[in-house]
Image (tube, helix red, strand yellow):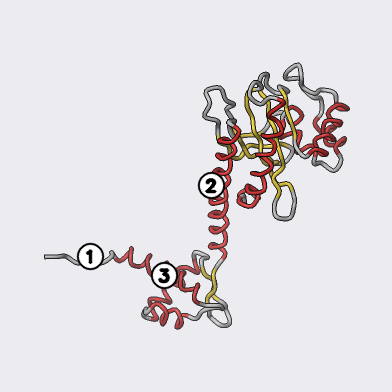
């Protein structure tokens, strides 16, 4: 003897009906009356009205004060933006993983927040000897590939360097003379990518290329970091080419970079 599926509990059924009511807006091009919702969902008028009003209180729907019809509310827009950022982040991480596979090195995305750059996502190399990254601000804008890339995009590079104050030395190759840093930034702007050779950490080399949005504005940077013995001079062109191929795809996916 077979048993039919149990009826949903009252609370669960109410949630299902609310979801169905929101999905019903796919079938309408304009604001929707409660009677239209009743007809579309085969619900009693009182039930449709009660659900719609609950959704209005949650800002998932808005009711026009004159026509008393409903349209989708701002809470859905907020949730949609959050979902888009999450989906964009997942897509961007997949591209980062491709960069790691092709280069063999750790890859990351950084954005500028205020006067500092911060890593927002990264995928580490699987090699035993690799660079470990973490969330948080880039300590030295003048001594990292990401920092120098963002500085090179400043309309007034001299003023941007002056705002940094004294340039701290981290390794023997750190650029500490503002005049030399300004020259380095001009070179980066011309070639379109940044290289950091043991300027922040000895034995580590990193590269950065810009990530642009649909309008061509740089919103982030793609960075690859690894040991100097693997990211050698004769590999630079290949690694940069890989990064330049990946950066536009990350830009298309990364709505989360707009936060």
For the residues labelled 2 and 3, the Cα–Cα distance comes to 28 Å
Residue located beneath label 3 in the image: 20
Give x and y (percent) for residue 69.
53, 79
For residue 200, above or below residue 190: above
For residue 51, above or below residue 97: below
Give the total number of marks visible in the rendering: 3
For residue 42, above or below residue 97: below
Give x and y (percent) for residue 135.
59, 34
**Which residue is located at x 57 percent, y 64 percent?**
74
Q: Mark 3 falls on what kind of element?
A: helix
Instruction: Name the mark on residue 90.
Output: 2
For the residues labelled 1 and 2, the Cα–Cα distance comes to 37 Å
Quadrant position of the N terminus in the picture: bottom left
Residue located beneath label 1 in the image: 5
Contact (Cβ within 8 Å) of mark 2 with mark 3: no
**Which residue is located at x 15 percent, y 65 percent?**
2
Q: Is residue 199 left or right of residue 78?
A: right
Give x and y (percent) for residue 107.
61, 35
Give x and y (percent) for residue 126.
52, 29
Sequence order check, earlier mark of 2 and 3: 3
């Amino acid at each position: 003897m077979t048993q039919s599926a149990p009826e949903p509990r009252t609370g669960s059924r109410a949630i299902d009906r609310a979801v169905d009511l929101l999905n019903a807006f796919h079938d309408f091009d304009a604001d929707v009356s409660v009677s239209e919702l009743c007809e579309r969902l085969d619900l009693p008028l009182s039930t449709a009205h009660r659900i719609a009003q609950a959704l209005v209180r949650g800002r998932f729907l808005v009711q026009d004060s004159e026509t008393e019809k409903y349209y989708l509310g701002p809470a859905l827009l907020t949730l949609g933006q959050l979902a888009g950022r999450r989906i964009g982040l997942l897509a961007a991480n997949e591209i980062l993983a491709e960069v790691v596979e092709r280069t063999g090195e750790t890859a990351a995305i950084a954005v500028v927040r205020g006067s500092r750059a911060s890593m927002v996502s990264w995928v580490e190399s699987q090699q035993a000897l690799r660079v470990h990254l973490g969330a948080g601000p880039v300590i030295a804008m003048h001594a990292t590939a990401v920092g120098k890339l963002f500085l090179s995009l400043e309309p007034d590079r001299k003023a941007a360097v002056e705002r940094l104050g004294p340039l701290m030395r981290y390794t023997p190759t750190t650029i500490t003379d503002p005049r030399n840093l300004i020259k380095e930034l001009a070179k980066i702007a011309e070639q379109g990518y940044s290289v950091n050779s043991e300027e922040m950490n000895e034995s580590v080399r990193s590269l950065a290329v810009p990530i642009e949005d649909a309008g061509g504005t740089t919103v982030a940077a793609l960075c690859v970091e690894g040991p100097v013995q693997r990211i050698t001079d004769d590999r630079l062109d290949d690694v940069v080419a890989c990064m330049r191929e990946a950066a536009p795809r990350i830009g298309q996916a990364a709505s989360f970079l707009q936060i």
